[in-house]
Image: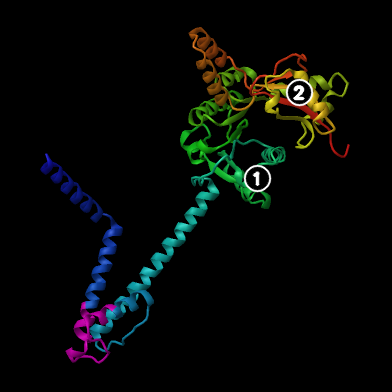
Amino acid sequence: MNSREEKKKKSSFFRRIKASLRDPLVILCLAIVVLIYLACVVVYTFERMDAGLSECGIETKFDTFWFMCVAVFANYFEYVCETVPGRAAAWTMLMTGLVLFVCIKAKIASWFLDVQMKDEKGLKKVDDMQGHFLLCGWRPGFEDILNNVLISNPDITTDMIVMINDAQEQMAQLRSQKKFKDLIYVSGDFTDEATLTRAHIETAGRALIISDKAKKYSDMEIDSRTVLAVLTMESMSRGLYIAAELISDKFEKHLKMAHCDEIILTQEYERNLLASASSGRGYSNVIRALISDDADSGLMICEIPEALIGKPYEDLRKHFTYGRKEGEILVGLLLNSGNFHLRRKEAIREAQKNPNMNAIIGGLKKVKTLVSNEPLFTPANDFIIPKNTKAIYVRGKKNA
């Protein structure tokens, strides 16, 4: 059995050698080595002192080797050959060195150019990152969306944003601006696993999927790709917080089934805003002020102190009245906040602690019906604040 394995290894080794000998680059390298070796033999034969044909100073084989190194790699002669064969061999070494230098220089320049082109076209794999922000898709007004993302997330810098889309030309124009030069771009389909792998989705913190109009898709195709992207991302990174934009509410239930953490219904928001403006009561101005891109005012969400979890809502209201900054008004709670999969694991652990099988089954069913980030405005004072809940409040502008 061992002899068979040894024969297989030997045969595979010789096959690799034969395959490499068919490579033109390998053949060229071997030809250059043979040419330099023959030139060394000629120089040593005709130029060494004891041959009596020349007095250039070459005495040993090491002198010939040194003469070759200087001629090929430094492109000048350590010794001056006097015979015709020696001069021909020296000239051959010199020209071989020039050709090698040009080829190596061209290869290095080509490598750097290839790296730069891949970076500009978004074909290069992103370096290892932790907690970065994925911005998937492109549509007109993308620069405004990007600006608002940076304003609304003071903890995110441009070098933490990875854009994934097929709009190479638009991304090149965007990254040519000084303030966006550190943005990272990955070209490709954000529904494809290979593209998401290049963006290091496994270590990303958050993802925003906007309605992609980089190509001529119908509204149904755009929403379908959004759902597919959420499903792919959820399967590749369980700890990723995903917010997705939909054009139509027809696909909302699909995103809920995929446990998308936030769903933005563009057309529904537009319809509601137009309807509220038709009343003539200024609702649109109020909504605009509440959801403005000012990160320090408007409708805000914050963590609830651990000591108030499991306590009545009245205690949290008192905390905002006496323990918070002036100009902040509590308006409600955000239930089941944060990443769905983290909450799911926690709910399963809580259910498994109960030895009653019916309780476990009931707990698992409850997990399936969880609604991510469910707002509850002005609950009753005796409402008990559950885990994974955040506070919703309104903060006024400092200069108001």
Q: How is the image coloured?
A: rainbow
Q: Residue at x 22, y 74 (%)?
A: 38
In the orientation shown, which residue stands out farthest toward the top? 358
Q: Residue at x 78, y 15 (%)?
A: 381
> Pointer 2: what residue?
316
Q: Secondary structure at mark 1?
A: loop
- Which residues make up the magenta segment? 41-65
For badge 2, the amino acid type reads Leu
Q: Position of residue 392 (x, y in %)?
A: 74, 25
Sequence-wise, the earlier of marks 2 and 1 is 1
Check the image and report above or below for 45 versus 355. below
- Residue 56 image-quadrant placement: bottom left
The answer to whether residue 72 of the structure is visible from this angle is yes
Left or right placement of residue 242 versus residue 99 in this view: right
Mark seen at residue 157: 1
Count of number-bearing discs: 2
Does 186 lie within the magenta span? no
Dot 2, how many residues are within 10 Å of its Cα: few (below 14), some (14-19), or many (20+)?
many
For badge 1, the amino acid type reads Thr
Task: From the viewer's side, name the closer residue of 330 and 5.
Answer: 330
Left or right placement of residue 129 versus residue 96 in this view: right
- Residue 161 image-quadrant placement: top right
Residue mark closest to the camera, 2 vs 1 = 2
Q: Residue at x 36, y 68 (%)?
A: 100
Q: Position of residue 46 (x, y in %)?
A: 20, 85
Q: Position of residue 310 (x, y in %)?
A: 68, 19
Check the image and report above or below for 167 versus 328. below
Specify the quadrant that holds the C terminus. Answer: top right
- Name the main secondary structure of what is drawn in magenta: helix
